[in-house]
Amino acid sequence: MAADTKFTESDNPQKRDQAYNNYVKEVTPVHNCFAECIKAFVTGGIICTIGQILIEIYKGIGIEAEQAALWTTISLVLLSVILTGLNIYPSITKWGGAGSLVPITGFANSVAAAAIEYKKEGWVFGVGCKIFTIAGPVILYGIVSSWLLGVVYWIFKLIGIV
């Protein structure tokens, strides 16, 4: 079925529905769930391995473990932003799926990608307004859920449970 086929109201509804369903089946990509999960696992594992290597490097040059973890986080975010700017991170995400989106690198990618996409609209109305389009809900729900958990913890502490 060609992509330019028109489905009009005057056609037989059953014929039209069948033609549309065939067209949808033709253009819908088929994914192997097991293979996609393996790719996500490998991609996330590589990101975590790079993180662990960075921690060991930072500790090896004399930085304490807690500070090494902080510098590793900063390094992974920076690396993600650079790869997004070079248009490499989207290819990693296309192959690795959630394995590249779930770690902090995916969050940094979403912020950087929005900034790059909307830069053409200007710094204020483009980047300034749209930079947190994707990341905004993550920030919002992260803050709200941490606040709620803090209140629950505070109440438990007052009662003496914690």
Image (cartoon, rainbow, N blue to C red):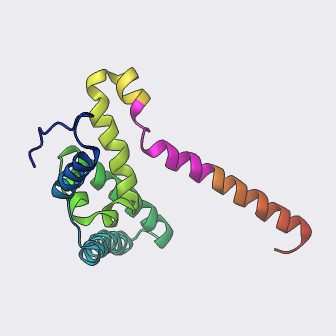
Most distant residue in the right direction? 159
Please tell me which residue is depicted at 43% across the width and 28% down the height of the picture: 129
Which range is magenta? Answer: 130-143
Q: Nearer the viewer, residue 78 or 161?
A: 161
Magenta stretch secondary structure, dominant: helix
Asked if residue 80 lies left or right of residue 71, the reply is left
Please tell me which residue is depicted at 37% across the width and 71% down the height of the picture: 55
Residue 137: in magenta span: yes
Residue 74: image quadrant is bottom left
Most distant residue in the left direction? 2
Asked if residue 66 lies left or right of residue 10, the reply is right
Task: Give how far across and how far down residue 53 sits, in percent.
Answer: 30, 74
Task: Give how far across and how far down residue 23 sits, in percent.
Answer: 18, 51
Indicate whether 59 appears above or below 78. Answer: below
Task: Give how far across and how far down residue 136 sits, in percent.
Answer: 49, 42
Indicate whether 50 appears above or below 116. Answer: below
Indicate whether 90 appears above or below 125. Answer: below
Residue 69: in magenta span: no
User: Which part of the image, by quadrant, shows the C terminus?
Assistant: bottom right
Q: How many marks?
A: 0
Please tell me which residue is depicted at 37% across the width and 43% down the height of the picture: 111
Task: Give how far across and how far down residue 116 sits, in percent.
Answer: 27, 36
Please tell me which residue is depicted at 31% across the width and 30% down the height of the picture: 118
Asked if residue 66 lies left or right of residue 106, the reply is right
